[in-house]
Amino acid sequence: MNRPPTIVDVARAARVSVPTVSRVLTGSVPVRPETRDRVLAAIAELGYRPNGAARALVQGRQPIVGIITRDPSAYGRARMVLNIEERARQSGFVVAIAVLDPTDTASTDSALDVLLAQPIAGVIVLDYNLYDSKKLHARLGAVPVATVTNGGDIGIDVPHVLVDDRAAAREVTRHLLGLGHATVHHVAVPGARGEPHARELGWREALREAGAPEPPTVMSDWSIESGRKAGLRLAADPSVTAVFCSNDELAFPVMRALHEAGRRVPDDVSVAGIDDEPLAGSYIPSLTTYRLDFDWAGLAAFELLAHPNRADLRVGIARHGLVLRESTAPPPHTSN
Amino acid sequence: MNRPPTIVDVARAARVSVPTVSRVLTGSVPVRPETRDRVLAAIAELGYRPNGAARALVQGRQPIVGIITRDPSAYGRARMVLNIEERARQSGFVVAIAVLDPTDTASTDSALDVLLAQPIAGVIVLDYNLYDSKKLHARLGAVPVATVTNGGDIGIDVPHVLVDDRAAAREVTRHLLGLGHATVHHVAVPGARGEPHARELGWREALREAGAPEPPTVMSDWSIESGRKAGLRLAADPSVTAVFCSNDELAFPVMRALHEAGRRVPDDVSVAGIDDEPLAGSYIPSLTTYRLDFDWAGLAAFELLAHPNRADLRVGIARHGLVLRESTAPPPHTSN
DNA sequence: CTGAAAGCGCTTACAG
DNA sequence: CTGAAAGCGCTTACAG
């Protein structure tokens, strides 16, 4: 193949000047119908497509919105990506995605390099908390940023949408305590920089306000296998009657492990999660959880890029409420 | 703010020529250490970032790889996107994603417009089958394309990776028949353009080769709710002893519906799916399914963009094999 | 090792 | 309504 056709080739084929082709393309200025038709015919014949880079350059436009995220196949992030893409497209932006593994600094750097070499209008960071926020902020430089956080202090001033993990965890824990459980155990995931995750903090708050004992957390990562191991550990402790899992994806293998160990949910042990994944209602037993509005969080983050000072978005809290299902019930022998 | 700093500003601040700044940036040609330091200092001070559009224009590079997909939050597609992104980044490309709803032609067109206005090196279509392939192909024009198909004829000649849905469905159905079931019912999803889905074809083939009766399919879409309804319909038919669901995501609500109707899995009814979603092993009962290698499919599709004639990729078949778990067993009263 | 010149493919004023 | 000119911000030969 030769080089792809340019606007000059089209102009020559249509026997008009280059700016006239441009006018047909952009529709900015009226063009005589016959001229217009000749140009369109030439475009079709040559299979011409305007060069996006040249266009972006001359218009000073940055047509790309970047998303920086950890594994985007997880439920909440997948929903946010989906909604940002849809909203961005309506505004004429293309969404570019950079998957950054917070534990792998080298790959993080290279992914950022590649992304920031594009004409980027702004970047949405899904969970700034995860990264070394000051370093990331420095690398982003003057690029407009919006982020979705779960409430932890990120140490820098960035427009953010709050997904209120802490409040969600508090409510789930309160629900379990309200059923009469003496306390609630917690399958925790690591927070940012070695600190406890916001969901762990909310759990602890609820226990304290109720004066309930605070059992040690069972740590897990985000893998199914690690959730299963956590479940097996909890199953071995007969005093466990209620388990709050950091998220639904962990609650499923935890329930599975309890089942394997012969403990019934919810008769012997109640289990609850957070997120309300699509499958939460299809599990046996169906899972009590807290629905978070990730769709809204994605849309709001995009809006923040354009309107960093919109107070309604900055304080916006993406939550929806407790979803009560079958996996939670009063403890086996309620003493009150 | 003023306009962002350009390479001219940096050159002035560092008291060097513009090309010298460029040389520091690209590292293409050695620069004297002191000069280099001055330039780097100026870059840092001004917060300069090279304009991606100008760079792409002058280098004639197309730094973006586009992905066209339906809802990317579904498991298989999410994995493919993830793997394409990682592979693309290694080669210095950024991945832009365009979510096209095959049922909404207008939004499809606008999403394509926005995507194709970028400097695109190539496009990966996840499941060409879904779209009006000739029309899509025409709109893509000379843009290099690779696609992942599930075996249906797409009517155009495009480099493709085959995810062999048909073979997977055949094997799952054979497995159920091999357990002694008189026949296997099927919860089907729509194929492209009103034709049966490849998974339905594979199911039918297996029944025919075994001489088993071919019960009518129970149609579903991709929603949990519709899977549940399909399950309820099957539960109402006492002759049903084995159900092959188009995918795992449907198998969960189907099992749930059977459970609600008082039919035990696998004692009364066996259920199997395709995909091997992460949660398949955590369900109670754990789900027998067929593992498809979406990670490989994504990587192979990217390779095809660069090497459209690599035969090993074109005939590549992304499958992994049957995963036997608890949800399938011999029928209640085996007569042999 | 470094500077002056040319050019990538477009669009935007400026004239007519 | 249309053409000739200028310029967007870079990089790549071309000289020195």
Image (cartoon, coloured by chain):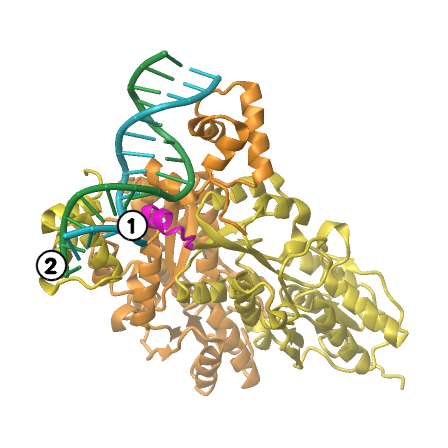
Chain colours: A yellow, B orange, C cyan, D green
At 42% across and 70% down in the image, what residue appears?
B244
Q: Residue A249: x, y in percent? A: 62, 64
Measured as percent of width and height from the top left, residue B330 is found at 49, 70
Q: Residue at x 44, y 46 (%)?
A: A118
Q: Secondary structure at mark 2?
A: helix
Neighbour tally class for label 1: few under 14, some 14-19, many 20 plus, Cα within 10 Å: many
Residue B289 drawn above or below residue B39: below
Secondary structure beneath dot 1 equals strand
- In the displayed structure, does residue B285 sit left or right of residue D3? right
Query: Residue B174, percent across and down?
Result: 39, 64
Chain under callout 2: A
Which span is picked out in magenta? A50-63
Q: Which residue is mark 1?
A: B145
Distance of label 1 from label 2 (alpha carbons): 33 Å
Is B256 situated left or right of A27 in this image?
right
**Magenta region includes residue A335:** no
Above or below residue B202? Residue B22 is above
- Circle nearer the viewer, 1 or 2: 2
Question: Magenta stretch containing residue A54, yes or no?
Answer: yes
Residue B336's place in the image compared with A49, above or below, is: below
The disc placed on residue A239 is none
- The residue at the point 44 percent across, 59 percent down is B77
Q: What residue did someone put label 2 on?
A: A35
Quarter residue B260 falls in: bottom right
Q: Is residue B229 left or right of residue A256?
A: left
Whether callout 1 and callout 2 share a subunit is answered: no
- The front one of A296 and C7 is C7
Q: Quadrant of the C terminus of chain B?
A: bottom left
Question: Where is residue B175 shown, x and y percent of the image?
Answer: 43, 63
